[in-house]
Image (cartoon, rainbow, N blue to C red):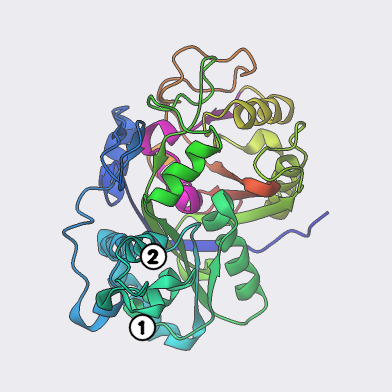
């Protein structure tokens, strides 16, 4: 059983998704039950499906000093960093701790592979990359983190986590360990993933993409809608901000059951959940809201519904928000952590958008429409391919004091 951990303050956070740019746009869409999904209009030969596309990525320009990093993924990262005064808050933290004492840990599943796809589509007569794509830094899985480190002028530990759909949830756990060990004083965490052919056609080849807007936990659900997003948060020791929400705990597990199918009894997911509650010092009945992974695939939703039913009382509310944003893959962890934080701040349980005919596997905890109530504790589930699972526990400022 993991030991109780010291909470960390989440002193800044932001998200940009198909719902819009920044926190106000995310909250407004959630509060009004408005999806950001639309018919697919991206790709070399657009697949017949629905996507969560972020407006303005194509017209976003990187500063001249960062121009060598230019690609769709890094443009979305730059767009996301501009929201909610996030860069200014990092500048304050950098002045307080020093650039070398702030870790940068970002999750992504594809990084800038869209740029590499483009380069290969434009090979010259000799089979070489076109001159404007001869930028090795954008053709690596670490492109995102290296770009953001340069953009934020951070020189501390810099890591890319790529564990499929749990990527930008697991960065919270890595940051908590680094701060606990005294390696750093604060950490910027987050994740970015963008739409590209590899993602769209790859998931379609696995027969996981729906041709309609996704319907998490609906009895007739038939697959995911893929989205793109960017999100970031700043973690500091809890004494730095008494009025900030807290990261109470985290849980991680890998059941390694199958490359793309969850363990039929949700073994890894339950281990991650139990570890998060233990580190946070929480009982299941203290959890007010769970943002579920809820991808709208048959097996994921079946397994997760059973986990909720056997683990929580009906007073714990639960929903998936992928009907709003689509499944943002490596960015899903941070986007849904932000949803959990917004739920705490505004007393909003987002309804399970798209679930018009609830699957009988879902119990009384599921919130099918928006609900208003005080939320002191919220969990965020992120389950990736290969049985890679993470669960984060957040709480209102001052909880448990």
206 relative to 87, above or below: above
Which type of secondary structure does the marked residue at label 1 adopt? Answer: loop
Q: Main secondary structure of the magenta part?
A: helix
Q: Which mark is residue 93?
A: none
Q: Is residue 356 found left or right of 278 in the rendered image?
A: left
- In reply to whether residue 34 is colored magenta, the answer given is no
Q: Which residues are magenta?
A: 315-342
Q: Quick one: 37 or 366, which is closer to the camera?
A: 37
Which residue in the structure is indicated by mark 1? 153
Residue 328 visible in the snapshot: no
Q: Which of the two discs, 1 and 2, labels the residue nearer the N terminus?
A: 2
Say which of marks 1 and 2 sits in front: 2
Q: CA distance from mark 1 to mark 2?
A: 26 Å
Residue 314 percent location from the top left of the image = 63, 22
Which image quarter holds the C terminus? bottom right
Place residue 64 in its image quadrant. bottom left
Residue 176 percent location from the top left of the image = 61, 67
Q: Is residue 59 found left or right of 45 in the rendered image?
A: left
Which residue in the structure is indicated by mark 2? 116
Residue appearing at x 68%, y 48% in the figure = 386
- In reply to whether residue 319 is colored magenta, the answer given is yes
Q: Is residue 285 found left or right of 103 in the rendered image?
A: right
Residue 332 visible in the snapshot: yes
Q: Is residue 3 found left or right of 10 in the rendered image?
A: right
Q: Residue furthest right?
A: 1
């Amino acid at each position: 059983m993991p030991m109780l951990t010291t909470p960390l303050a989440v002193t800044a956070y932001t998200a940009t998704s198909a719902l819009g740019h920044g926190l106000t746009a995310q909250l407004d869409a959630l509060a009004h039950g408005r999806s950001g999904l639309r018919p697919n209009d991206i790709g070399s030969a657009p697949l017949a499906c629905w996507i969560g596309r972020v407006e303005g990525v194509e017209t976003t320009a990187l500063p001249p000093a960062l121009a060598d990093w230019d690609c769709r993924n890094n443009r979305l990262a730059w767009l996301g960093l501009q929201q909610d005064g996030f860069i200014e808050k990092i500048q304050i933290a950098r002045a307080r701790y020093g650039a070398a004492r702030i870790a940068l840990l970002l999750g992504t599943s594809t990084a800038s592979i869209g740029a590499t796809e483009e380069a290969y589509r434009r090979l010259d007569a000799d089979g070489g990359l076109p001159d404007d794509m001869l930028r090795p830094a954008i053709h690596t899985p670490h492109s995102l983190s290296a770009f953001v480190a340069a953009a934020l002028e951070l020189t501390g530990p810099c890591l890319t986590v790529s564990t499929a759909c749990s990527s930008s949830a697991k960065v919270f756990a890595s940051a908590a360990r680094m701060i606990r060990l005294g390696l750093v004083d604060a950490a910027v965490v987050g994740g970015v993933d963008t739409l590209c052919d590899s993602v769209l056609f790859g998931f379609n080849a696995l027969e996981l993409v729906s041709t309609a807007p996704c319907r998490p936990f609906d009895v007739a659900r038939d697959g995911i809608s893929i989205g793109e997003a960017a999100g970031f948060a700043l973690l500091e020791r809890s004494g730095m901000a008494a009025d900030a929400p807290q990261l109470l705990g985290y849980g991680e597990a890998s059941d390694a059951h199958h490359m793309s199918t969850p363990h039929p009894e949700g073994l890894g997911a339950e281990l991650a959940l139990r570890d998060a509650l233990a580190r946070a010092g929480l009982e299941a009945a203290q959890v007010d809201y769970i943002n579920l992974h809820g991808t709208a695939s048959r097996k994921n939703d079946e397994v997760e519904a059973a986990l909720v039913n056997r683990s929580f009382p009906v007073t714990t509310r639960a929903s998936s928000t992928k009907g709003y944003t689509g499944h943002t893959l490596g960015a899903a962890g941070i986007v849904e952590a932000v949803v959990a934080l917004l739920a705490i701040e505004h007393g909003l349980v987002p309804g399970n958008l798209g679930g018009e005919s609830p699957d009988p596997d879902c119990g009384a905890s599921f919130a099918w429409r928006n609900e208003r109530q005080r939320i002191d504790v919220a969990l965020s589930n992120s389950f990736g391919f290969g049985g890679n699972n993470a669960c984060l526990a957040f709480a209102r400022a001052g909880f448990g004091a």
